[in-house]
Image (cartoon, rainbow, N blue to C red):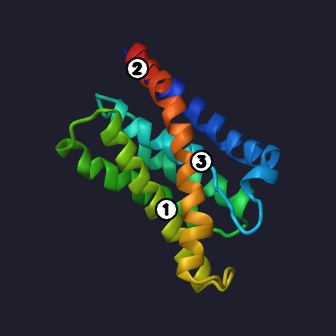
């Protein structure tokens, strides 16, 4: 019997893709208030939840993350390849460390902070090489990375228990 999670996971992923752009647009005045910019990462959050909360590891999260990255690049960044590479890379790294972690709220919170930092640094380096951004590393850390982590941690705290319950009930 196929897991209902195989149906719910892609629906949640598409919802996260949609909300990443929609909420960024609706709250643009708060998220992108000069000189600060906070990037929502609901797709990354959903993928990390999938890796760590799916106890059977039967979801093809790497493939879905590549697809989500392609859609994200296509619709939101306009720079092909950034999230197409970054999201599967983070999912792969999470799968590698999962067996060694005691999964609880704080552990997953720390994993999420690290993954946010990896993705944001990856995007920053990609944009620097492509000459899309010219800001220095200190400006990136203060004006983008810090606010991005703060906003996404608040979202993590709000969504952790409901999503965890969803995974426990569906699986």
Residue at 49% x, 69% y: name it. 121
Mark 3 or 2, nearer chain start: 2
Q: Residues within 10 Å of mark 3 (few under 14, many from 20)?
A: some
| Residue closer to the observer: 161 or 73 | 161
Measured as percent of width and height from the top left, residue 141 is found at 53, 70
Mark 3 or 1, nearer chain start: 1
Which one is closest to the eye, mark 3 or mark 2?
3
Q: Is residue 81 visible?
A: no
Residue at 39% x, 42% y: name it. 109
Q: Which residue is mark 2?
A: 3
Left/right placement of residue 10 relative to residue 33 reads left
- For the C terminus, the image quarter is top left
Q: Which mark is residue 119?
A: 1
Q: Residues within 10 Å of mark 1 (few under 14, many from 20)?
A: many
Q: Which residue is mark 3?
A: 151
Mark 2 or 1, nearer chain start: 2
Measured as percent of width and height from the top left, residue 62 is found at 42, 49
Q: Residues within 10 Å of mark 2 (few under 14, many from 20)?
A: few
């Amino acid at each position: 019997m196929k897991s209902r999670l195989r149906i719910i996971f892609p629906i949640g992923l598409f919802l996260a893709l949609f909300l990443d752009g929609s909420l960024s647009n609706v709250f643009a005045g708060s998220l992108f208030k000069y000189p600060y910019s906070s990037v929502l990462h609901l797709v990354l959050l959903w993928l990390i939840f999938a890796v760590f909360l799916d106890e059977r590891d039967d979801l093809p999260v790497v493939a879905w993350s590549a697809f989500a990255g392609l859609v994200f690049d296509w619709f939101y960044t306009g720079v092909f390849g950034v999230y197409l590479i970054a999201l599967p890379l983070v999912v792969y790294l999470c799968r590698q460390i999962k067996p060694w972690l005691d999964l609880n709220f704080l552990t997953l919170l720390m994993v999420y902070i690290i993954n946010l930092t990896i993705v944001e640094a990856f995007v920053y380096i990609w944009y620097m090489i492509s000459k899309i951004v010219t800001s220095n590393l200190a400006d990136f850390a203060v004006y983008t990375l810090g606010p991005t982590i703060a906003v996404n941690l608040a979202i993590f705290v709000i969504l952790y228990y409901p999503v965890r319950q969803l995974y426990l009930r569906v699986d």
